[in-house]
Amino acid sequence: MCGTCGCDEQVEVITLEQKVLARNDEIAAANRDRLAAGGVLAVNLMSSPGSGKTTLLERTIRDLGPRRLAVVEGDQQTPLDAERIRRTGCPVVQINTGAGCHLDAAMLGSALDRLAPPRGGVLFVENVGNLICPSLFDLGERDRVVILSVTEGADKPLKYPHVFAVAGLVLINKVDLLPYVDFDVAHCRRHVAAVNPGAQVVEVSATRGDNLDAWYAWLDQLRAASGRRDHTS
Amino acid sequence: MCGTCGCDEQVEVITLEQKVLARNDEIAAANRDRLAAGGVLAVNLMSSPGSGKTTLLERTIRDLGPRRLAVVEGDQQTPLDAERIRRTGCPVVQINTGAGCHLDAAMLGSALDRLAPPRGGVLFVENVGNLICPSLFDLGERDRVVILSVTEGADKPLKYPHVFAVAGLVLINKVDLLPYVDFDVAHCRRHVAAVNPGAQVVEVSATRGDNLDAWYAWLDQLRAASGRRDHTS
């Protein structure tokens, strides 16, 4: 989050950041209530630019069918990703953040006004490609997934720990490229465990389809756990 | 830059951002004077996480020799990149931004206090891996380079236009992986030209060494132009 300048405004910046985050958390709580009331499981997908989030969603929609899914696409500019999702037949809303570096809860709230995911369905929120700022902003989602492609290097969980620390699942994507890059999967798994011992880690290839059943099983488990929680609350 | 929340604090956020950026620009101007007085060419390298910035620097130092080079490494956490540069024999300072998503001029100023690049040398500033926020913060550099790896996709200049718009040079890196990914170099070049007609674009492979002479020639041209400018100012 911007505001680490060491300049005279630093205290003012921190105070304002706290206000912005507190306001965001209020809206996120409202989104969470609204999603629970509608029986919708929302998952926030975060990653670097180009890690394969949209390709993963295209494949997921093709495999699971578009009927019970919906997507919110976050990008600085262009409707390119929403157009890709729309071609799968899945309902989608594009949010362009302009200069902004992340989605926030108000943006998701306004997307929910335009998109009505079906009861029992899954709402995928593809955040802006950025391994830093999105981790600070609760959107009201049920859980967070970080996608890391093997072309980015196994050291990323240590270098960008905050986003990995808040994820329930880490997908190591593009394993079809493993023969051509210097990426040690075991090292990467250890680095994820070091910053987030509770995170599950699954290796996949969204383009080739490797191991996507494990991703779908994780979604099923999350849906089952959400159902139990909503039932007992 | 964080602060596009559409919430009640928006005006307050924008005002404070303007103050932070104005203060940053003052410090950047001081850095620029200091670098010019020392006869040092500073280049700000910006990219997504894992695009190959550190590998490019390791190779550049190996090819050009460490004697007239220096490096400032920006990362959220860890001294990993500085350790890699140190092994090449090149002077290096690591800046860890913590929660911060970019370097700013004050951080570079403090790094310059600890690092004295030689007259006629080049200072490479490897920014935090982030295609968004670093573009807003002038550090006092002579020019900016964006590194985009072919694994990230050719659409990135359109989706993250601000960082491409401020770059003098775009390096399309990891061309050794072109046979294994869906990346159209001609499309990418057109997208860069659409957001920044003046940017040069060079295709390279930092790991395999392809076409790095064009990168070194760009640095030489920049040094020559800076020399002329300093002479006539």
Image (tube, coloured by chain):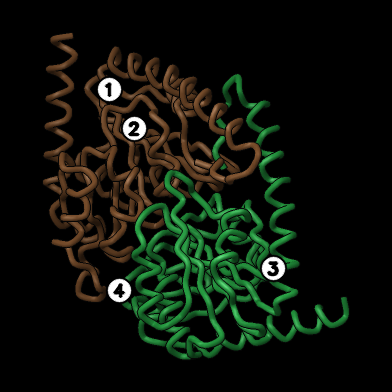
Chain colours: A brown, B green
Camera-near label (4 vs 2) is 4
Label 1 to label 2, Cα distance in Å?
Answer: 10 Å
> Residue A210 vs residue B28: left or right?
left
Residue located at (66% from left, 85% from top)? B120
- Given the image, on which type of amino acid does mark 4 rest? Tyr
- Given the image, on which type of amino acid does mark 3 rest? Pro
Badge 4: how crowded within 10 Å, few (<14), some, or many (20+)? few
Residue located at (44% from left, 70% from top)? B53
> Residue A85 vs residue A12: left or right?
left
Same chain under badges 4 and 3? The reply is yes
The quadrant where residue B179 appears: bottom left
- Given the image, on which type of amino acid does mark 1 rest? Val
> Residue B18 vs residue B173: left or right?
right
User: Which residue is tagged 3?
Assistant: B197
Chain under numbered label 4: B
In the rendered image, the residue lying farthest to the front is B114
Label 1 to label 4, Cα distance in Å?
Answer: 37 Å
Residue located at (47% from left, 84% from top)? B60
Mark 4 near mark 2, Cβ–Cβ under 8 Å? Answer: no
Same chain under badges 2 and 3? The reply is no
Looking at marks 1 and 2 on the same chain, the residue that comes earlier in the sequence is marked by 1
- Given the image, on which type of amino acid does mark 2 rest? Ala
Label 3 element class: loop
Label 3 to label 1, Cα distance in Å?
Answer: 45 Å
Image coordinates of residue A51 in percent, x first then y, are: 34, 56
Chain under numbered label 2: A
User: Which residue is tagged 2?
Assistant: A70
Mark identifier at residue A40: 1
Mark 1 near mark 2, Cβ–Cβ under 8 Å? Answer: yes
Q: How many marks?
A: 4
Who is closer to the viewer here, A67 or B120?
Answer: B120
User: Which residue is tagged 4?
Assistant: B180
